[in-house]
Image (tube, coloured by chain):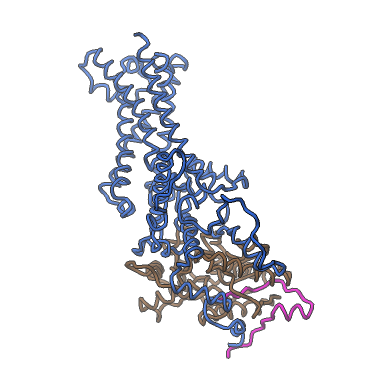
Chain colours: A blue, B brown
Amino acid sequence: MEYLPNIIFAVILIAGIGYFANNVKKLIRNIKLGHKVDASDHTSERWKNVVNIALGQSKIVKRPVSGFLHVIVYVGFVIINIEVVEIIIDGLFGTHRIGLSILPESVYGFLIGSFEILAVLVLVSVIIFWIRRNVIKIKRFLSSEMKGWPKSDGNIILYFEVVLMCLFLVMNATDTTFQSMGSGNIISQFIAPWFDGFSAGTLHTIERAAWWFHIIGILIFLNYLYFSKHLHILLAFPNVYYGSVEPKGKFNNLEAVTAEVRLMMDPDADPYAAPAETSEDEVPAKFGASDVMDLTQVQLLNAYTCTECGRCTSACPANLTGKKLSPRKIMMDTRDRLEEVGKNIDLNKGKFVDDGKQLLGDYITNEELWACTTCNACVEECPVSINPLSIIMDMRRYLVMEQSAAPMELNNMMTNIENNGAPWPYNQMDRLNWKDE
Amino acid sequence: MSEQLKVPTMAEMMAEGKQPEILFWVGSAGSYDDRAKKITRAFVKILNKANVDFAVLGTEESNTGDVAKRAGNEFLFQMQAVMNIEVLNAYEVKRIVTCDPHSFNCLKNEYPGLGGNYDVIHHTQFIEELISSGRLTLDGNTYKGKRITFHDPCYLGRANSVYEAPRDVLKKTNATLIEMKRHKGTALCCGAGGAQMFKDAEPGNKEINILRTEDALETQPEIIATGCPYCNTMMTDGVKFKEKEADIKVMDIAELIADA
């Protein structure tokens, strides 16, 4: 019986981490539904981006208020989680504050003291975040795609953090040995008096309860990530690594098209040649994207990484002028469809069974796609290097090249280019007339 | 007809056995659009004034295919690109300057993958180069103290991080440069990009060019400067919509410098 708490702890820990690992496997499987991308180039630049943009938060601070608060929560989250190491060791081996027996009292006190200060800063920041979302009503949190689950999701994450921080502080405040040590209880010494008059036994029970709920809360939070927009705390790092290192204006040239164009321009090509032999399963390359499987693995990683902050949408010229397009919605739709496809695969023993749905039409409408000016404002804004524009472009390509579904005016423009090398119906031979006008 | 410009073509140059220092890519707007042709002429005036050894492709130039690509027609883009690259490579073109940020971006970033490798610069960069190397001198009085705001074209700014060249050139005119709230990386699009120039906007509550013009009007400018024929059209329309065309001119940097 003596080891019962240790065993219970180990079981909870393994179950918590195990379930999470299982979902991470699913996440990776889903991302791998996309086309492979060669990202073996520019390694040093990619790492530099991870250091500056992801670790260094260089883009998020471009909006100073939310940026500053985010840095506090980020730093707090990372540093306070050092405490989890101690909790896990204590939990598994039945020790109490193992850190104290390893580290000098002053060092341990300094560490816990820093955690306590950060906990309070995080608490304050999170409350301001909640006010920004629910009281001040900042426009980017009120868009149509933020109704229902995305709105609750945002708030649930904040509640989680409030509860976790409070449990941490209460745990310290009710730990009589820690309080009597008088080092590191910078904040909790002011909470301790709230429990004056409690018996030593009650205090111990509260301390234990706070300790258990704290670690269980962390494990629940860890597993909540997969079902939430909050995955960015993990995926931001790989996402920034795989983010584009090219000028933003450079759109990829479709290789499948290049092959066909080369053939068309080749004077030696035999127009009656039989198509090259292909295996029966081979599907001819599709131009552009109509569903998540047509996108790249990086685009799908982008979708899981998006934390719905909406900075992209708040900078989008189309969205600012009342058009339906919202780059954030493009990312959310891509993720939601990918999740739907993933569940379909789970239900059908590892194979996707056509569900008569796709990203184009069922999630993203033509109207949204045609409203984009390709200005790159969304790409510039994203604090974690997500590229909504590339998905819009791939879907436009599908509309135009597979469905011939461009707006009529654009078809006219393209016909002009085909006929006379200009988007307007002017004669090619008049190209130099400006010289003498 | 205004003053005579010297505009040699690559074909003429080749016939004389000469290779110009730089190819001026005029682009479709610069060749055919009435407003943009003025920009083209202003830029050539600068080239002539600075004695730049340049040439154009003339009737051998065709649309870069950029707008087709942004509209989603990768086929048409690559057809145009392959055709143009054949011409450019036949003339052994090394360096290209253009007044159109869309052509600039496309030639610079998207042609190399299809076999067209050139050193491509935007005309604001070239003008800056001409001034700082002393090949072009400005008298500095025409725009002295005038309030000018610069609208960043998306395909020059965000797309290729060229923010300083146009500003450096503007400062050399002794004008007072006033920035809009949204500028450089956060500049708002004029509304023409991504093939929007050639179609009506989707339903909304405002036109993008009006919103951008309002940004510009906040700076109380005498001149709205830009470096893109499409931005020019959109901002000119915006100024007209606001009935400010009597007080505010929309000018390309080439036009400003041609008279500076």
Foreground residue, B141 or B225? Answer: B225
Residue at the farthest bottom position: B1
Residue at the farthest top position: A2
Foreground residue, B98 or A427? Answer: A427
Tell me if B23 is positioned left or right of A398 in this view.
right
Residue A188 in the image, given as x and y percentages of width and height: 31, 24
Chain part drawn in magenta: B1-28
Judge whether A251 appears above or below A103 on screen.
Answer: below
If the image is split into quadrants, where does the C terminus of chain B sit?
Answer: bottom right
Residue A58 in the image, given as x and y percentages of width and height: 48, 46
Residue A350 in the image, given as x and y percentages of width and height: 46, 39
Magenta region includes residue A99: no
Foreground residue, B15 or A183? Answer: B15
If the image is split into quadrants, where does the N terminus of chain B sit?
Answer: bottom right
Residue A194 in the image, given as x and y percentages of width and height: 23, 23
Judge whether A165 appears above or below B219 on screen.
Answer: above
Judge whether B65 appears above or below A430 on screen.
Answer: above
Tell me if A165 is positioned left or right of A61 in this view.
left
Foreground residue, A129 or B206? Answer: B206
Q: Is residue A226 visible?
A: yes
Q: Residue at x 41, y 64 (%)?
A: A371
Q: Residue at x 56, y 56 (%)?
A: A285
